[in-house]
Amino acid sequence: MWEAAVEALSLIMEPSRLIWLISGVGIGLLIGIIPGMGGAVGMSILLPFLFGVDPLKGIALLIGMTAVVHTSDTFPSVLMGIPGSGGSQATVMDGYPLAQEGEGARALGAAFFASMVGGLIGAASVVVTIPIIRSIVLAIGTPEFFMLALLGLAMVGIVSRSSMLAGLLSSLLGVFIGLVGAAPATAQYRFTLGWFYLYDGIPIVVVALGVFAIPEMTDLLIERRSVARALSLGGGRLDGVRDAIANKWLVLWSALLGTTVGAIPGLGGHVVGWLAYGLAKQTSRDPERFGKGDIRGVIAPESANNAIEAGALIPTMLFGIPGSAITAILLGGLVLLGIQPGPRMVTTDLATLLAMMWTLAIANVLAAALCFALSRQVSKLSLVRASRLVPFLLALMFIASYQATEDWGDIIVLLVLGAFAWVMKQLSWPRAPVIIGYVLAAPIERNLFVSMNLFGLSWLTRPWVIVIGVLIVLLLFGGLGGSVIRGKREMPRDTDREAR
Amino acid sequence: MRRYTVTDRGSRWRLILGVKGSRAWGVAHLSIFRALAMSFAILLIATACATDSDTQNNTAAADNQTEDASVDPYYEGASIELMVPTAAGGGADAIAQFMAPWLSDFIEGNPQVVVTHHPGAGGVAGGNKFEYSRDHDGMTLLMGTLATATNWLVGEPDVRYDFLDWERIISTSHSGLLYISTDTGVESPSDLLDTDAEIVKGGRAPTGPIWYELAIEVLGIGESIREVWGYEGGGALRLAFEQGEINMNGITRSNFLTGDAYLFEEGLAEPFIQIGIPDGRGGLEADPALPEDLPTVVDAHVELYGAEPSGEAFEALVTLVETLNLAAAIQTHSDAPPEAVEALREATAALVEDPEFLENLEDTLGDPSIVAGQELDDAFDDLAQMDESHLNYIRTWLAETYPAEVGDISPN
């Protein structure tokens, strides 16, 4: 396999192909910075250019773009509290408070470094496990998929800052939003209110922007301030890098988590950041700081979401099942390039797969370097007063929503969800679980339906189903127990501390 | 957290722009910025109002028409929109992206062909938009998908287009087959009736390509096969097949030649029956691109019962096959200007004869079947003359057999 790896590297390093890679990185960078756009949009823009292109150049462009989006999407997450794309929603939790306290540069530095390392670890771990990967994925049957999706939902309890009950209710609300539209397995339409637009459900862009962005923008305008309450970004990007290095084990296992979850088809990029964040919080000795500006809350999700694309390439290339929204479009692009996913990717076509991994690695490094260089300039956006910045951003967001299906429904639903989410924000209900519930609704229902049809109730006795079930119970009650204990401990304390 | 309130607007801007200077300069900067912003906004609005791509196309077309038509081709300097009713990245998208530059080359006048995506309502939104939100001037084409056809076929209530009413210019034909796991030891339909093995077929949703189920019905082997719905797509079905969760699956010819090919090469799966392609006489014949010894539904019926199939179910199946065979067609409106349709048909007639195109088609999409011109028209005529009772049969059968919600039983 090492000969194939070296061969793949020499294939990629050819100057003309490198140029395609760099172009992909550049485009991905821009797309990540604009809140709400996400990698899927960029991919669809690039598709028409792929026809007739030499496959390795095309791969360089597509994957270069994929790798970068998760690095540059940190900018809006940290600076404005709006996720740049699905993967970086969790980054907002601690990144944004850090920026508000004037430590934006530190958060960015930590995020970029963690992103870069996470992406590299992701690519490396995929390459290392190539010999056994196929058998691993084959061992995950439909019931196991269902349990894993439930596990994702259970994570919700951990990431909710306030009451875990509120978190679970929010996640169920998200599941409800996810149910709108056609049922996964039958030709029945639910909750469409007789409105044609809702037949395909509510697009993820609309939900993400409505639930996260609209309330933030609205509050920014109401409070008439700029994003950063302080007038400086604080010292150091390098401080951030040092923080990331100090937390190297966190970076490592977040990346491994990201790769693993990415390799499970259907769970998707949105959940990964939350999983990493949740686990980081749960396994830390002083979790109270999470949500108020703990740098670890930035490092964990950023490392994980860059690793996810490496993992997501596995089901995509081996089985033709997209591991995430981006890889879904990538699959279409690969067909145009004449590349056929299948088991051949780990045997005769191994060089192609390895070329992709090399591209991912190189693109991640390039992306981190570029983001570092640009961070000072881009960060100044957070100093601009809200009344100047927000209208521009709102216009961008409406356009981003509208391009989901180019129907007025996109705008209407955006506003309705946005208004509802704003109320949630005022009442301190956690909104992040809504997205988690939304994303997991389809896999949960689909896999449960198929499991019941295939096995009746006997699937409940499968070994891994039981293992994951126990894990879920532990997480839920651990979270509940933990928050009760923490609640008792925290009550007499002053919540307004500035200890660093 | 302490708040820093900055009342001096000038110094805020100085900080951002890195300009050192007097307070007055900072404030003056602000007014210039305002003025620029206003003019830019006005410019944007003016441009938006003035530009309308449809109007531009119409103007171009109108200009061409008023001039001597034999001098300037209809599509000279024009831009054609090729609408895909799904999100980017699916099978229909791949075909559209592949065809766009070829069409551009071959259509007289070399118009630019731009692929746009219109996902929604399982493919119905795109079809509706094509019919109602676009001018019928030949400047818009639709990349049909199986869903465009099947939703119309089953009378899905929000379908506002008439599938039969479009002008098809080129079509990649579809054909389907069922394959079965070699573990079951079942090799032919008669084996199926004798075996003890449990046969589980995986499927997506009942409004998808239901011809597999209808074929099973025609052959009368439905009792021996358990159907599990709910799989997400071809990839998920393939994975489930390899895991042994299902042991029968239905795929199209192009998947047989490409994505699912390894299952056969590695001996995991064996082709069971093929649906067949329309023979132009109201029956089904073998698809030449599939293995010769793979029985069609007709052959299998003869093997099982000693006679050719007949009756409502079979006739409905033939109708269904004829419909789906044409489903993945690029089409334009039937009331588009005759010069436009003429130009398109000339282009596609030349295209399907072009060896380079055919070679490229096979290399890229793996499947060399493409139909245009008279052959396409013949197939379409068959469909147009279909008995409405066949449509009714399909809809009734669907409603009774599967958890599907279909429209009221009345033909278009």
Image: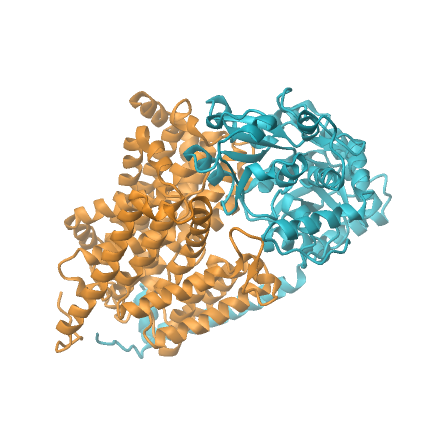
- Does residue B293 appear left or right of residue A144 in this picture? right
How many tags in the picture?
Answer: 0
The foreground one among A312 and B233 is: B233
Q: Is A417 situated left or right of B84 in this image?
A: left
Position of residue B279 relative to residue B61, above or below, is above
- The image quadrant where one finds the N terminus of chain A is top left
Chain orange in the figure, letter: A
Asked if B246 appears above or below B367 in the picture, the reply is: below
Here the colouring is by chain
Residue A37 in picture, x, y percent from top left: 45, 55
| B107 in relation to A185, above or below | above
Residue B215 position in % (x across, y down) = 65, 37
Asked if residue A265 can be seen in this view, the reply is: yes
Q: Is residue B124 left or right of residue A105?
A: right
On the picture, is B338 further left or further right than A265? right
* Residue visible at 45% across and 70% down in the picture: A418
Measured as percent of width and height from the top left, residue A281 is found at 21, 58
The answer to whether residue A107 is visible is no
- For image coordinates 49% across by 67% down, the residue present is A414
> Residue B370, how many percent across, how many down?
69, 31
- Quarter of the rendering containing residue A213: bottom left
- Quarter of the view holding residue A378: bottom left
**Quadrant, the C terminus of chain A:** bottom left
Q: Colour of chain B?
A: cyan
